[in-house]
Image: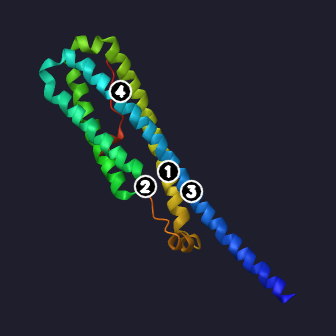
Amino acid sequence: MGLIILLIIVVAVVLFFVGIYNGLVTARNNYKNAFAQIDVQLQRRYDLIPNLVETAKGYMKHERETLEAVIAARSGAVSGLAAAKASPGDAQAMQQLSGAENQLTQTLGKLFALSESYPDLKANQNMMQVSEELTSTENKVAFARQAYNDGVMYYNNKREVFPNSLVANMYGFAPAAPWEVEAPEARKAVKVSFT
């Protein structure tokens, strides 16, 4: 009888720790999936930028430096996304992505500010369509970033509470880093209105 009770206790403890482990894996997979949604939206954003630059190029012949800065910032952001995609939640990768995205947002802001000086560009149908798509994508990026950060917070909370922390440390569940926006002005979506 005593052996059966001991066996039941051992099985219950093992099942308890298996449940903790599985919960940590599920939470980690959830934030990685949320990052995959960020990846989709950022790729869409990056795909729209060359169209925007090509449209603006014909009108803004004297603003070559700004157009080149946008393309360079886009390249940096693509690299930052690749690094973050390779290791979602890694603090250094997320910081690199954040810096690259902030740089891209700032250069896009300069492009749109300069475009105000070109009435024909503002009236261009292609420019208005790309701008509208970019605005929509910026909103989706913000939503995806919030979902990712929520997933990271849930995972980090789950891995830090006792007794989960014992299992997390034993099996190498590292903390995940949220996607922080560095500058307050970068928290706002780029204004792309040409009406």
Pointer 1 with pointer 4, Cβ within 8 A: no
Q: Is residue 24 left or right of residue 107?
A: right
- First in sequence: mark 1 or mark 4? 1
Residue shown at 50% from the left, 65% from the top: 173
Kind of residue at disc 4: Leu
Q: Nearer the viewer, residue 30 or 142?
A: 30
**The disc label shown at residue 79, or none:** none
Kind of residue at disc 3: Ala
Residue 80 x, y percent position in the rendering: 32, 46
Residue 27 x, y percent position in the rendering: 56, 56
Pointer 2 with pointer 1, Cβ within 8 A: yes
Q: How many marks?
A: 4
Residue where numbered disc 3 is placed = 27
- First in sequence: mark 2 or mark 1? 1
Q: Quadrant of residue 125?
A: top left
Whether residue 179 is visible, yes or no, is no
Within 10 Å of the Cα at label 3, are there few (<14), some (14-19), or many (20+) other Cα atoms? Answer: many
Q: Is residue 145 left or right of residue 159?
A: left
Mark 2–mark 4 Cα distance, whole angstroms, equals 26 Å
Residue where numbered disc 1 is placed = 32
Mark 2–mark 1 Cα distance, whole angstroms, equals 8 Å
Residue 159 x, y percent position in the rendering: 53, 65
Within 10 Å of the Cα at label 2, are there few (<14), some (14-19), or many (20+) other Cα atoms? Answer: many
Secondary-structure class at tag 4: helix
Within 10 Å of the Cα at label 4, are there few (<14), some (14-19), or many (20+) other Cα atoms? Answer: some
Secondary-structure class at tag 1: helix
Whether residue 125 is visible, yes or no, is yes
**The disc label shown at residue 48, or none:** 4
- First in sequence: mark 3 or mark 4? 3
Residue where numbered disc 2 is placed = 89
Residue shown at 61% from the left, 61% from the top: 23
